[in-house]
Image: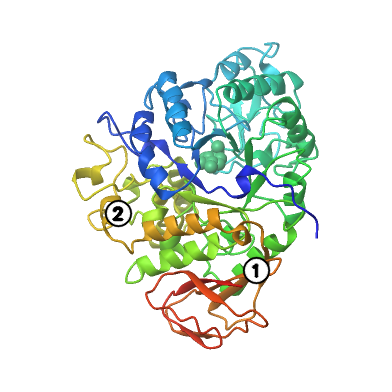
């Protein structure tokens, strides 16, 4: 077996903060940097050592900050650069690094580069973006925006179309332009010099696009650009870099996260996340998750990147529905199933990510009316599907299951007014279950979802097998997901009942004699591995020595 070069982020656990919905310190209804600073001790208590901050830059907020108008200044809604410096300082005092969201597939249409580019065809910034002449008086081709409709928008001043893979207010940058790339390296170095811990790279697999060949993801120059980025910015700085890559295969995963370190530390792959949609269709076209498919996909990634790369482990982020509502049971087994899903994921090899609120088992938004949904993607899909003849009931069911707003409701800190998130009117409606699901009560109850996550993180810090052990999927009855992690003569066994009916499991420890139960989501879980009956959503991690 190859000796893997150890990195600090191999044993890290990362906590994603969506600042707008985290904690509002000044009562304007929007979360802010001072709010994050005030909650750093909470984040520390959970035990994570890295925060991924969703965008906090200047932005007109067409896509909640993923449309950036100035990469080097802080949106006044969130605070000032002084607040940002304070956040970096206070986090570092607590041993927490901050990774920034790098959104460089596109800018806002209010970014000075685009304002200049629009002025004339010979403006020095014109080629920072992608412009094409009309073809037969229409869009240059059939490319579609990920938010619905054509990816081309006509600009009347210069009689050309520009490309936007998201909203028309998010024009795509032209990565073929070396000058543009240099401007991005300067900006990244500005943040690196401030002492950040790394970058999460938004839809990074789109930057190699070839619009004329209608290639969006994994374009021909993608890896060249990433290698150049690595050399010009973070390459020799020991930072954590994670790319968002919706279209990645395991082969791509190896290229990106090759331990030789020419590109990124790891990627977010989304194969497992797409198992509950009808293949080849949109994620709104719902299909029930098959546990066997989940096992196959997660195992495939575990095997493929065992030595030749590194996995990220996640169920949630600001674009995804809440996992306990999605693949758990957010009613009578909310706590048990949230802990089961946590155990299943955190037992694997890779760097785990926790999205704010996941650690207290927050659930989907449960909005009944389209008016309550704020997200531009949701509003567009609602209109598109209504026009295409889908029934209202069908559309609302898809939104209830998959809308991004499910993850974006304000963090539930307590059962006080507005869940203790803000003393003003929150920018977005709260999940009505905050009187029972909130941080304050999670911290009081010793068997809460919070303490389960905290324990999983502690085990990771103390257990090399959990960090570096090789993964092996075990045969089991269909409702159970069981696997081993093996490092030299030590083993971990993770066994999870993914559903409500009781399920039997049996395991032979072979020549090993001692079995320690490390964590379970029930009291009195069995250690008789020859014959276990797992209760609804029961999940156990054993150490076998
Ligand atoms: C992925 C981000 O996670 C999402 O929130 C955003 O809308 C798109 N990229 C566009 O930046």
Residue farthest toward the left in the current orientation of the protein? 417
Q: With respect to residue 41, does 84 lie above or below? A: above
| Vertical side of 540 occupied by 79: above or below | above
Q: Is mark 2 within 8 Å of ligand 1?
A: no
Q: Which mark is residue 63?
A: none
Q: Residue at x 60, y 25 (%)?
A: 192
Q: Which of marks 1 and 2 precedes in the sequence?
A: 2
- In the structure shown, which secondary structural element does the residue marked by tag 1 occupy? strand
Asked whether 77 or 52 is in front, the reply is 52
Where residue 452 appears, as percent x and y from the top left, is: 41, 61
* Left or right of 335 in this view: 436: left
Q: Position of residue 512 (x, y in %)?
A: 64, 79
Where in the figure is residue 338, as x and y percent of width and height?
42, 64
Q: Nearer the viewer, residue 206 or 331?
A: 331
Residue nearest the viewer, comparing 165 with 441:
441
Task: Tally the numbered discs.
Answer: 2
Q: Is residue 367 above or below residue 265?
A: below
Q: What residue would you read off at disc 2?
A: 443
Task: Look at the numbered disc 1 and say if its residue's Cβ is closer than 8 Å to ligand 1.
Answer: no
Q: Quadrant of the N terminus?
A: bottom right
**Residue 395 percent coordinates (x, y):** 43, 57
Q: Which residue is mark 1?
A: 490
Q: CA distance from mark 2 to mark 1?
A: 33 Å
* Residue 181 visible, this orientation: yes
Labels 2, 1: front one? 1
Work out whether residue 203 or residue 490 is closer to the camera in this orientation and state it.
490
Circles 2 and 1: CB atoms closer than 8 Å = no
Q: Quadrant of ligand 1?
A: top right
SS at badge 2: helix
Q: Quadrant of the C terminus?
A: bottom right
Residues packed near mark 2 inside 10 Å, few (<14), some (14 to 19) or many (20 plus): some
Residue 327 seen in render: no
């Amino acid at each position: 077996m190859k000796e893997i070069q150890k990195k600090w982020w191999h044993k890290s656990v990362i906590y994603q903060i969506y600042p707008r919905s985290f904690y509002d310190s000044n009562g304007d209804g929007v979360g802010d940097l001072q709010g994050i600073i005030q909650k750093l001790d909470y984040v520390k208590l959970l035990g994570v050592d890295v925060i991924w901050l969703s965008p906090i830059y200047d932005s007109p907020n067409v896509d909640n900050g993923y449309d950036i108008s100035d990469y080097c200044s802080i949106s006044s809604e969130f605070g000032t650069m002084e607040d940002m410096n304070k956040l970096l300082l206070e986090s570092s005092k607590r041993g927490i690094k901050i990774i920034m969201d790098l959104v460089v597939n596109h800018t806002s249409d209010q970014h000075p580069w685009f304002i200049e580019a629009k002025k004339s065809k010979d403006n020095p910034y014109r080629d920072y973006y992608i412009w094409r002449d009309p073809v037969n008086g229409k869009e240059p081709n059939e490319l579609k925006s990920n938010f619905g409709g054509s990816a081309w928008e006509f600009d009347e001043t210069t009689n050309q179309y520009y490309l936007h893979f998201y909203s028309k207010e998010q024009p795509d940058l032209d990565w073929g332009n070396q000058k543009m790339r240099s401007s991005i390296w300067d900006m990244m170095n500005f943040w690196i010099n401030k002492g950040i811990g790394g970058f999460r790279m938004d839809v990074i697999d789109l930057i190699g696009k070839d619009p004329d060949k209608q290639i969006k993801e994994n374009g021909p120059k993608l890896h060249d650009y990433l290698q150049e980025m690595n050399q010009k910015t973070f390459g020799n700085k020991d930072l954590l870099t994670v790319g968002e890559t919706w279209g990645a295969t395991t082969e791509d995963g190896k290229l990106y996260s090759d331990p030789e370190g020419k590109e990124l530390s790891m990627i977010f792959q989304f194969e497992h996340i797409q198992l509950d949609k009808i293949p080849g269709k949109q994620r709104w076209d719902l299909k029930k998750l098959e546990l066997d498919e989940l096992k196959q996909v997660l195992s495939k990634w575990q095997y493929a990147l065992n030595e030749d790369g590194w996995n990220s482990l996640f169920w949630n982020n600001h674009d995804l529905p809440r996992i306990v509502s999605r693949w758990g049971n957010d009613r009578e087994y909310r706590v048990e199933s949230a802990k089961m899903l946590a155990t299943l994921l955190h037992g694997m090899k890779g760097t785990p990510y926790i999205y704010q609120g996941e650690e207290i088992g927050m659930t989907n938004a449960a909005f009944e009316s389209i008016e309550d949904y704020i997200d531009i993607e949701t509003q567009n899909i609602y209109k598109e599907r209504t026009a295409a003849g889908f029934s209202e009931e069908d559309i609302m069911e898809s939104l209830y299951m998959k809308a991004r707003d499910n993850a974006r409701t304000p963090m539930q800190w307590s059962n006080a007014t507005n869940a203790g998130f803000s003393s003003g009117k929150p920018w977005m409606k709260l999940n009505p279950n905050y009187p029972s699901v909130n941080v304050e009560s999670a911290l009081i109850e010793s068997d809460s979802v919070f303490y389960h996550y905290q324990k999983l993180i502690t085990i990771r810090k103390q257990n090399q097998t959990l960090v570096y052990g090789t993964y092996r999927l075990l045969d089991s009855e269909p409702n159970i997901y069981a696997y081993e992690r093996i490092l030299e003569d030590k083993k971990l066994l993770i066994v999870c009942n993914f559903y409500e009916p009781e399920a039997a499991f049996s395991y032979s420890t072979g020549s090993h004699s001692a079995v320690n139960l490390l964590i379970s989501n029930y009291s009195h879980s069995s250690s008789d591995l020859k014959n276990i009956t797992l209760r609804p959503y029961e999940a156990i991690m054993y150490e076998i020595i």
